[in-house]
Image: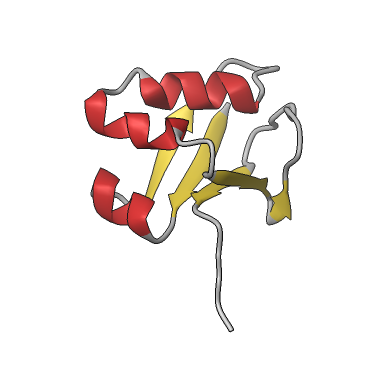
Amino acid sequence: MKIKVLFFARLKEQLGESSISVELVEGSDTNTLKETLLARGEQWLALNDEAILMAVNQNHLSQVAILNNGDEVAFFPPVTGG
């Protein structure tokens, strides 16, 4: 299955990517996706920062979620502002 992955703010800069497409086996979850990305190399360890948030299809996650073909997953740092 194919997943679209988006990166925002400092992650976009650190990874040099704003979006990529990742192939995963059917039934994969968000942990599998993250492990797949971390295996790409040292710069991808930025995703291991505990402050990094994740959303699937624009819904914030608080736990692991099963992914489906065509899902969009976003990784982003917390947003602050006034």
Q: Is residue 27 left or right of residue 52?
A: right
* Residue at image point 32% right, 32% down: 44
Image quarter hosting the C terminus: bottom right
* Residue at image point 53% right, 36% down: 50
Q: Is 14 drawn above or below residue 32 in the view shown?
A: below
Who is closer to the viewer here, 75 or 46? 46
Way the structure is coloured: secondary structure
The residue sitting at the front extreme is 82
**Residue 18 appears in the picture as rendered:** no
Quarter-of-image position of residue 38: top left
- Residue 78 coordinates in the image, percent (x, y): 55, 57
- Residue 5 coordinates in the image, percent (x, y): 48, 43
Report how many numbered discs are placed on residues in the image: 0
Q: Is residue 73 left or right of residue 37?
A: right
Q: Is residue 6 left or right of residue 29?
A: left
The residue sitting at the bottom extreme is 82
* Residue at image point 66% right, 23% down: 29
* Residue at image point 49% right, 53% down: 77
**Residue 37 appears in the picture as rendered:** yes
Q: Is residue 76 left or right of residue 82?
A: left
Who is closer to the viewer here, 69 or 31? 31
Who is closer to the viewer here, 40 or 63? 63
Who is closer to the viewer here, 44 or 27? 44
- Residue 69 coordinates in the image, percent (x, y): 64, 33
Image quarter hosting the N terminus: top right
